[in-house]
Image (cartoon, coloured by chain):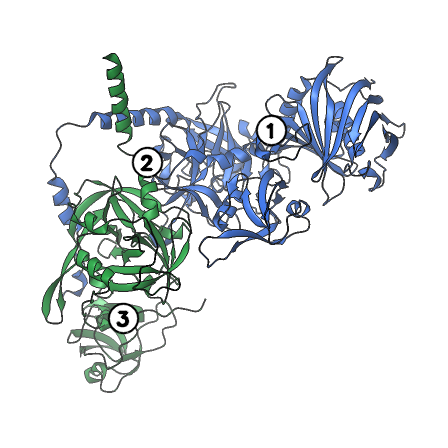
Chain colours: A blue, B green
Amino acid sequence: MKLHHLIPLPFLALLGIVAALPRSSAVDPDVVKAEKERLAIVAKVRPAVVAVCPFGGGGHGSGVIIDPEGYALTNFHVTADVSPVMSAGLADGILYDAVLVGQDKIGDVALIKLVPKKEGTPFPFVALGDSDKVQAGDWSLAMGNPFGLSTDFTPTVTYGLVSGVNRYQPPAGGGTLEYTDCIQIDTSINPGNSGGPLFNMKGELIGINGRGSFDKRGRVNSGVGYAISINQIKNFLGHFKAGLDTDHATLGATVETENEDGSLSEMKFGTILEEADVFRRGVKPGDKLISFAGRPMTSTNQYKNILGIFPKEWRLPLSYRRENSRKETLVRLMGNMDTPVDRPQPMQPRPGQPGQRPADPTKEKAKRSPAFKLFKEKKGYANWYFNEVEQKRTLDAFHKHGDFAGLTGAWAIEGTFNANDRKGPLALAIADGSDGTIDAKLTMNVPFAIKMPTAERLQLQLPDNSGGLLAALTHWRRLLTMGEKGFTQGFSHGGMEPVYPPPADGKPVEDWAKLRVDCDVIRANYAGIEGKWYFDRKDAKLIAAEVQVLRDEDPCELYFSEFKAVDGRTLPHRVDIRWGDKNYGSLSFTKFDLKK
Amino acid sequence: MRLFVIALSAFLVSSAGAADPFPSVAAKVNPKVVKLFGAGGFRGVANYGSGILISADGHILTAASQMLDSAEIVVHLADGRKMKAAVLVTEPILDSALLKIKVEGKKLDEPTGLDLEHFDYFEAAKRPKAQPGDWILGFSNQFEIAMRDEHFSIQKGVIMAYTKMHGRRGVFDFPYQGDVYVIDQITNNPGAAGGPLTDRKGNLLGIIGKEIKNTLSETWMNYAIPLAAEVETKDGDKTVTLSLPKFVELGMKGQYKPVKRPETVASVGGYHGVIFVPNVLEKTPPYVEDVVTGSPADKAGLRADDLVSFIDGEPIYSIKMFHDYLKRTSAGTKLRLEVRRGENLQTVELTLGEYPAKPLPAKPTEPKK
């Protein structure tokens, strides 16, 4: 009795059938054309695909170069084991040294920089696409180095469909590797493909491949892979370039699906933390969440998706409904990571060949790499070296509009004000005392005066309802005249954040998104007060600031405009001030006397 | 004339582009599929699945899976509506089940008043079947990726073969013995069973099957049941031909009578009457603790403290292996057991019998979480 042969294979039969297929004599010209186009795209993007290796080489993960300087994207779970200095092989067969620049542990993204063999040589790179335009059913190309197959770094190409968009995959390792708003593909990805590019059929980068659903089929392609959307990465890219170890965000409020058993679901606010910005914006439990960051919200997955694609502290438009009125507001996101996570738990897909991890001698050798010169360790940063690079880039560009370095004498500015329902002449005087203190005086009909840094906390909020305008203007002068030296701690580049300058006429805003300006952020702390200074990424003008006088209170917001040259330096002739949800008012500057 | 040429070439280009409009095919198919949620959820058994709408009134065609073994099935429509459904009829031999959406205040056999987008099953079943080499699209809610109004997953593949499915893991696990489309894409993931297999234009071809493993090659099968599937089977003593279209037609009218199948006892094999030591380890050695008086084991002379070592020459290391082996047997099967008794290896002839009145539960019970 042959009990164990009850399961014959259908495959033998199948082979016969396939072989017997009638062959069509002529190939459709459209097919030939499509194939040619596909080959051309592969040839175009191939040189920019990276095999990310432990220092010295060996199979590990993949990546892709996104600019001529050699910045390349990969997965955090690829760099986690090999940072800070690693090797990166390109399709030309050359192994380059590379260094970690910035990372996002939760979102599983890392930015690395390849060091050219000869300084200044540009790297091949790919263009970033718009992943919001990707649709289920689109063709896609995945490239990378699965199973560490390619010892000469020639990337493997796989071709398949986008199976779904806006997918949510919960964290996979100790709170990290949460894939939000990601792209699901049937394009085959396997261990070693992690960190590699997903392209649309224009050869634009639409995602970074990193995970799959495996269940019982083992850690190989199961027809269900996931790529982190490039639009999410774009939100973090400014942070990465500044060497930040980024954090994701929460709203500080729970959102529940209402009438779970009903037909269509609605999202309703539950508990709201008192320290959350959304609480200060007046959102109350029971309010209905309509849309967030421009997307309608109808399910928990959508809510998790949208939260997952932004760094903490970003301000984003939120629409909600209370009874019958719809309200629009801007909400600042809170940080997510209470306890920093150092490394992910077992990852999926796991980079291939874990046996080739660098031993200690390799790490010592890595320290002699030119890439190691691009690494500075600092707590809370992925790589402080690049933060300094970005600080310099931002401030150098700003200084093209005027150098205030010598003007550390007394500042006297005259003009008019229109604030707190009053109008009149304005006089601002800021001068350093002989004992290292600063006297700041602002006269708007009545005088307000503070002495920094010794002022009492409540004094710092003067004038009333401004949120701390006088302290903010003191910071402004220090930033302009002294730069980093004017601040006691925390002077750093804060990556990229959006700013929404309010309309000049003070009317309520219906669509905040239209006002958005993307800015480089410089953070600076003086007298225990944290300020964030926003430089327009287009022209490096200082267009806004947020100065946080009291913790867990709204910061004083300054919006600078009407830029005109004064003695060869560009100065704003108008400053609008907002605190919380209110316009405090605007200042017009007409006369500047900035002494050396 | 020249204008005409330009217009013509523009038309050619656009028609070439329109040859693979998979995003629009996905958008067209998506409203006609539903996410199903039912029983299961414990290890290895998905409590979710996929279904195909085949009437405006809310009839759903899906695979006959354990997930349906629930008093009530929850359905998520493509527009995000959450509804309930009841199983009208299941035919394991066709590996198919027919469900209907329930609307509050309406009886199951009354019109629901819904006007849902759906596939025309009967029209589709009349079309010629797809051929090996043809492109297909698979749609499903595999891995429970989508909830509410989120879209089904779309996958692209090629039909490798149209062949008879005779792979099986015992009658209970895989009773379907008819033709299948074998697919080169990994479509048959958890929860994919019951989703539509379509041609490249979104025309319905079949129902994506379950997860089954080829135990010879240790590979998973990816297959779909064709819409016009027919299976010959025994109904009592007679041989009858079951057809999927007939099942759907009669099922929708509430007139389908499932075929009487042999008792599910077949899945646990023939009856032996051995009582093993408590199976506490993953590989508890098959030590006999006791035998049921008068059972085949008793008659064969098995006794307490015997260690079953071989069945028909195959080594048996654990109680689980013993049970797995026995699943492939039935009443009347003669087994040659070699058991270690004290220092010696003894050979015992065991003739399996019919289970006594109450069969063992055929399904694993849900472990406490």
Image coordinates for residue A179, horizontal then vertical, percent: 47, 44
For marks 2 and 1, the one nearer the N-term is 2
Question: Marks 2 and 3, how far apart in space?
Answer: 43 Å
- For residue B323, the mark is 3
Please tell me whether mark 3 sits on a helix, a strand or a loop. helix
Judging depth in this view, the residue of B51 and B313 nearest the camera is: B51
Image coordinates for residue A454, horizontal then vertical, percent: 86, 37
Callout 1–callout 3 Cβ contact below 8 Å = no
Judging depth in this view, the residue of A489 and B10 nearest the camera is: B10
Which residue has dot 2 on it?
A: A158
Judging depth in this view, the residue of A50 and A587 nearest the camera is: A587
Residue reaching furthest to the right: A434
Judging depth in this view, the residue of A167 and A126 nearest the camera is: A167
Question: Marks 1 and 3, how far apart in space?
Answer: 68 Å
Report the chain holding disc 1. Answer: A
- A595 lies above or below B168: above
Quick check: B206 left or right of B154? left
Quick check: B107 left or right of A383? left
Residue reaching furthest to the bottom: B293
Image coordinates for residue A364, horizontal then vertical, percent: 54, 36
- For residue A56, the mark is none
Residue at horizontal 28%, vertical 31%? B18
* Image quadrant containing the C terminus of chain B: bottom left
- For residue A517, the mark is 1
Q: Residues within 10 Å of mark 3 (few under 14, many from 20)?
A: some
Question: Marks 2 and 1, how far apart in space?
Answer: 38 Å
